[in-house]
């Protein structure tokens, strides 16, 4: 069975952006580009309408580049179960209210049973301090938590010993 990955908007933003002069951002961009070029074919990739909407915002040229990258990817539906679980996550994982979209990304991956949530959002998604709270919240609601990680963490071959 091919592992599944929900592509959060920060991944698409790094792929479509002009090279940064900031060394850390430039490194993240290169890692993301390398993952996209070398590893994405090993996974079934998904996005959501939220990713499409976020990618379409801002500078029209950048939005066009971001939108083109995700145009062919299948969508995960934002269902009532997803929105309800996102609201639960904000409370249970002590996410700030302004992180509602981040909670929705996590909920989309969890409710749809996606294996990995790929992101560079380390404030509210790929955050070791929040990970245990998200995992507990998922378990309380009967969902398996997706592995929330950066492209660097998902660069090597994934082994699923079923």
Image (cartoon, helix red, strand yellow):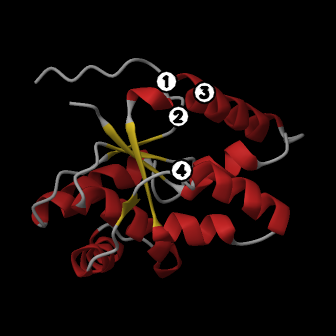
Using the image, determine if residue 31 lies above or below residue 98. Answer: above
Q: CA distance from mark 3 to mark 1?
A: 11 Å
Of the residues tagged 1 and 4, which is closer to the observer?
1
Q: Which mark is residue 37?
A: 3
Q: Which mark is residue 151?
A: 2
Disc 3 secondary structure class: helix
What residue sits right under mark 4 in the picture? 122
Q: Position of residue 4 (x, y in %)?
A: 32, 41
For residue 5, side relative to residue 101 (left or right): left
Disc 4 secondary structure class: loop
Of the residues tagged 2 and 4, which is closer to the observer?
2
Q: CA distance from mark 2 to mark 4?
A: 12 Å
Q: CA distance from mark 3 to mark 2?
A: 11 Å
Closer to the N terminus: mark 1 or mark 4? 4
Q: Give yes or no for contact between labels 1 and 2 (Cβ–Cβ under 8 Å).
A: yes
For residue 34, side relative to residue 84 (left or right): right
Using the image, determine if residue 97 lies above or below residue 115. Answer: below
Q: Give yes or no for contact between labels 2 and 4 (Cβ–Cβ under 8 Å).
A: no
Disc 1 secondary structure class: loop
Of the residues tagged 3 and 1, which is closer to the observer?
3
Q: Which mark is residue 155?
A: 1
What crowding class fits label 3: few (fewer than 14 Cα within 10 Å), some (14-19), or many (20 or more)? Answer: few
Disc 2 secondary structure class: loop
Can the viewer see residue 81?
Answer: yes
Query: Which residue is drawn at the image coordinates 45% and 55% (left, top)?
Result: 125
Query: Which residue is drawn at the image coordinates 24% and 53% (left, top)?
Result: 135
For residue 111, side relative to residue 9 (left or right): left
């Amino acid at each position: 069975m091919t592992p599944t990955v929900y592509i959060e908007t920060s991944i698409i933003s790094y792929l479509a952006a002009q090279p940064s002069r900031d060394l850390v951002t430039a490194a993240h961009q290169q890692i993301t580009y390398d993952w996209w070029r070398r590893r994405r074919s090993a996974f079934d990739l998904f996005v959501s309408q939220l990713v499409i909407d976020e990618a379409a915002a801002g500078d029209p040229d950048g939005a066009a580049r971001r939108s083109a990258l995700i145009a062919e990817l299948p969508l995960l539906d934002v269902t009532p179960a997803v929105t309800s679980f996102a609201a639960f996550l904000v409370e249970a994982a002590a996410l700030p209210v302004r992180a509602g979209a981040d909670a929705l990304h996590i909920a989309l991956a969890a409710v749809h049973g996606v294996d990995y949530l790929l992101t560079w959002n380390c404030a509210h998604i790929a955050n070791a301090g929040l990970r245990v709270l998200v995992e507990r919240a998922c378990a309380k609601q009967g969902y398996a938590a997706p592995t929330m990680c950066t492209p660097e963490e998902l660069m090597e071959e994934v082994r699923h010993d079923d």
